């Protein structure tokens, strides 16, 4: 039945389904996991990198050129918003560039950082348009937005290829998201601090990632907090050495025999 109605996004099936959007969501469910947890004094994001290898040049992430991250999973969308992506990375790059442009236009027009929900709305307006017009393909990517604004403080949003978005206390997208969601339901508490949230995120990632060992070559990590001295949000995307230090502090670092590979 589906084959007659899945040739384009503008055709509804008799059951009222848009199959191309469902296929886009299926592509995301096979992508590297991205997990977000909202704390009372910050937001924590972690992501599983799938593009790894000894010959991959990660010098920009390791040596301070840029803001950390490999450019695969974590992106700085604005000074007050970090984005984590799951799905087709090339689609994500296009959306990230659009989000950064929207944020800078808002800053230019109002001399203020864009509210987190407004940024999510603007991206979702664009994504929804790609599901309604002929000849277009939905974006095969979901995003988690970790952000801060003065009115609603710390927020965590999720958007998907259909153009829907929703606010969360803790959520997960990508592979094994069902397992991660059930673990978060059991362990999440409303009065969680950032340090506790970091521990929770790392524990959940260690149980849900496809790889048997947790290390900086397969993990990206970001934290958004509020800097009281500067009176502004502080976004930090961790470098590989800092991720390894976090894992050691939580007792989740790789065993010696794994790190001694010549």
Image (cartoon, grey):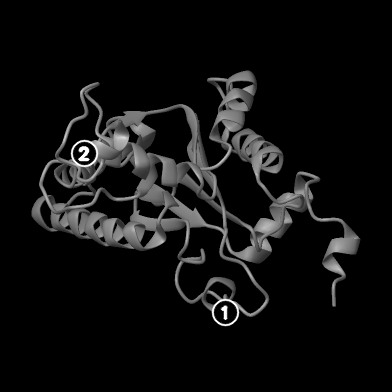
Q: Position of residue 199 (x, y in %)?
A: 67, 38
Name the quarter where the N terminus is drawn: top left
Q: Position of residue 102 (x, y in %)?
A: 18, 54
Q: Which residue is mark 2?
A: 121
Residue 21 in which image quadrant: top left
The label number, if any, that marks residue 83 in the structure image: none
> Along the horizontal axis of the image, is 114 left or right of 233?
left
Q: Which residue is mark 1?
A: 57
> Along the horizontal axis of the image, is 78 left or right of 171?
left
Q: Position of residue 220 (x, y in %)?
A: 57, 56
Residue shown at the point (60%, 23%) measured from the top left: 182
Q: Is residue 12 above or below residue 106?
A: above
- Which residue sits furthest right? 257
Residue shown at the point (63%, 64%) measured from the top left: 240
Regarding residue 116, the answer to whether it shows in the image is no
Residue shown at the point (51%, 57%) measured from the top left: 237
Q: Is residue 124 above or below residue 71?
A: above
Mark 2 crowd level (few <14, some 14–19, many ≥20, 10 Å Cα): some
Regarding residue 95, the answer to whether it shows in the image is yes
> Along the horizontal axis of the image, is 11 left or right of 260?
left
> Foreground: 149 or 67?
67
Residue 104 in which image quadrant: bottom left
Residue shown at the point (48%, 77%) measured from the top left: 65
Q: How many marks?
A: 2
């Amino acid at each position: 039945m589906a084959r007659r109605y899945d040739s384009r996004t503008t055709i509804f099936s008799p059951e009222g389904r848009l199959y191309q959007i469902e296929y886009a969501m299926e592509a995301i469910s096979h992508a590297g996991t991205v997990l977000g947890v909202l704390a009372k004094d910050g937001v924590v994001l972690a992501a599983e990198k799938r593009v790894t290898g000894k010959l991959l040049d990660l010098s920009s992430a390791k040596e301070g050129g840029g803001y950390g991250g490999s450019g695969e999973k974590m992106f700085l969308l604005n000074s007050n918003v970090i984005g984590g992506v799951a799905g087709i990375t090339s689609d994500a790059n296009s959306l990230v560039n659009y989000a950064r442009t929207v944020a800078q236009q808002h800053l230019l027009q109002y001399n203020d950082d864009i509210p987190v929900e407004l940024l999510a709305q603007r991206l979702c307006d664009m994504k929804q348009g790609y599901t309604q017009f002929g000849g277009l393909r939905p974006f095969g990517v979901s995003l988690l937005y970790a952000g801060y604004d003065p009115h609603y403080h710390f927020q965590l949003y999720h958007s998907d290829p259909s153009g829907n978005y929703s606010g969360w206390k803790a959520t997960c997208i990508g592979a094994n998201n069902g397992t991660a969601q059930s673990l978060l339901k059991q362990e999440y508490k409303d009065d969680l601090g950032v340090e506790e949230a970091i521990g929770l995120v790392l524990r959940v990632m260690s149980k849900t990632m496809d790889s048997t060992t947790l290390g900086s070559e397969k993990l990206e990590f970001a934290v958004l907090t509020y800097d009281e001295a500067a009176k502004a949000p502080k976004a930090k995307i961790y470098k590989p050495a800092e991720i390894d230090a976090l894992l050691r502090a939580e007792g989740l670092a790789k065993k010696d025999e794994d790190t001694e590979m010549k």
